[in-house]
């Protein structure tokens, strides 16, 4: 049987504290390794802040909507994982948290989630948009060439971003987060290559993936450099304002590029994916087997990977066969051969 190319699965995820969040369409779940060694799996319900209609699914517009939804879902998942990992500390809620819950009741969590997202966006914009612009504006006192200033701003933006990734990567908690990030990617790569979703097959899969938030951020910075170059306004505040107004446009374009790179495998998409996948070597690390176990639980909570293998690769994974062979070192050829034998017996 000829091997098929890697197939698009449609699932995505995010590393959280001691765990993984996986999302498949409207379904999402968080799996977290608790201090006692058990794995807590929780389905996460999230209603989009922006009502879905034909307009919000339009190319470029859908990227902005998806970006907002992903941020909200990501923050909610991280908050949940933090509660699970720190549940034994039995910390008392802060005065502000108690006041909000007292006056808003069930809406308190939504408000806190929104405030957290706003703070995260403001900090990101300040660090990766405003700061490089301010530094290049200072250079403009001595340098009057627009092209040189634009290139300088772009370089500073990339340096700040990479420096930020490397710097926070020195923290122990972030190192483990990067390892769980690798486990998330490995699970998706494992499924899309037609392998069984078992620890042994996931461990030998690729931790780099074209459909990743790291790649998205790189696209955002690259596209911003191009669009910002065409802002030809003399007033510094107006230039900054136009940069901020262009952020949704940049997010929309970046989403379409990462969507294209994740769905198709050809020389163009591989070229588009190369810079982002190279950067993922900083934001992902090789996971341990127990981390992979957590990632598998998160995937299975939202995705029927056996049905995916049957539909796209033509073989049926029996639960009994999987149970007998999951501890062995095998590859997908064993499953294909089993399917061929079964088909011959039927004929």
Image: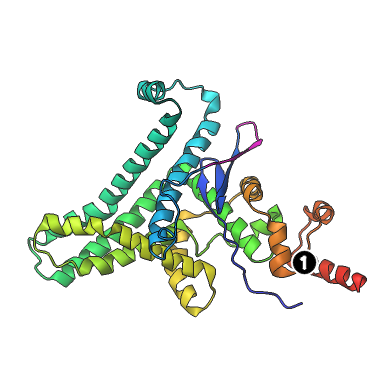
Residue 184 visible in the current orientation: yes
Residue 41 in the magenta stretch? The answer is: yes
| Residue 173, horizontal then vertical, whole percent | 48, 41
Residue 89 in the magenta stretch? The answer is: no
- Given residues 198 and 240, the one toward you in this image is 240
Quick check: 226 above or below 31?
A: below
Q: Residue at x 29, y 58 (%)?
A: 247
**Left or right of 305: which side holds 255?**
left
**Left or right of 15: which side holds 330?**
right
Alpha-carbon neighbours of circle 1 within 10 Å: few (<14), some, or many (≥20)? many
Q: Quadrant of the C terminus?
A: bottom right
The residue stretch that appears in magenta: 35-45
| Residue 1, horizontal then vertical, whole percent | 77, 77
What element does badge 1 sit on? loop
The extreme front residue here reads 54
Quick check: 281 above or below 100?
A: below
* Colour mode of the rendering: rainbow
Q: Residue at x 41, y 24 (%)?
A: 101
Quick check: 172 above or below 207?
A: above
Quick check: 176 above or below 93?
A: below
- Given residues 73 and 172, the one toward you in this image is 73
**Left or right of 257: which side holds 129?**
left
**Left or right of 99: which side holds 194?**
right
| Residue 335, horizontal then vertical, whole percent | 79, 65
| Residue 198, horizontal then vertical, whole percent | 71, 54
Residue 286 visible in the current orientation: no
**What is the total number of numbered labels drawn onto the structure image?**
1
- Given residues 67 and 334, the one toward you in this image is 67
Residue corresponding to mark 1: 315
């Amino acid at each position: 049987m000829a091997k098929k190319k890697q197939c698009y699965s449609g699932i995505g995820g995010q590393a959280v504290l001691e765990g993984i969040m996986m999302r498949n369409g409207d379904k999402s779940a968080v799996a977290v390794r608790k201090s006692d060694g058990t794995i807590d799996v929780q389905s996460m319900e999230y209603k989009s802040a922006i009502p879905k209609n034909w307009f919000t699914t339009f190319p470029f517009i859908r990227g902005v909507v998806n970006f907002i939804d992903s941020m909200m879902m990501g923050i909610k998942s991280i908050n949940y994982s933090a509660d699970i990992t720190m549940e034994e500390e039995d910390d008392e809620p802060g005065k502000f948290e108690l006041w909000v819950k007292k006056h808003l009741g069930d809406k308190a969590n939504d408000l806190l989630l929104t405030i957290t997202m706003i703070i995260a966006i403001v900090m990101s914009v300040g660090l990766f948009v405003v700061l490089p612009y301010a530094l290049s504006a200072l250079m403009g006192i001595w340098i009057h060439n627009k092209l040189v200033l634009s290139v300088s701003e772009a370089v500073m933006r990339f340096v700040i971003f990479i420096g930020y990734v490397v710097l926070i990567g020195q923290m122990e908690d972030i190192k483990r987060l990067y390892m769980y990030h690798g486990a998330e990617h490995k699970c998706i790569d494992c499924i899309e290559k037609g392998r069984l979703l078992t620890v042994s097959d996931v461990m030998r899969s690729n931790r780099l993936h074209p459909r990743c938030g790291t790649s998205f951020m790189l696209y955002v910075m690259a596209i911003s450099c191009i669009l910002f170059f065409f802002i030809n306004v003399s007033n510094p505040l107006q230039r900054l304002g136009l940069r901020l107004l262009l952020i949704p446009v940049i997010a929309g374009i970046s989403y379409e590029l990462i969507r294209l790179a994740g769905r198709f495998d050809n020389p163009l998409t591989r070229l588009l994916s190369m810079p982002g996948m190279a950067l993922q070597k900083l934001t992902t690390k090789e996971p341990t087997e127990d981390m992979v176990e957590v990632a598998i639980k998160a995937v299975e909570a939202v995705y029927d990977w056996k049905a995916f293998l049957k539909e796209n690769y033509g073989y049926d994974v029996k639960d009994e066969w999987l149970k007998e062979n999951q501890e062995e070192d095998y590859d997908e050829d064993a499953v294909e051969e089993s399917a061929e034998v079964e088909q011959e017996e039927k004929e």
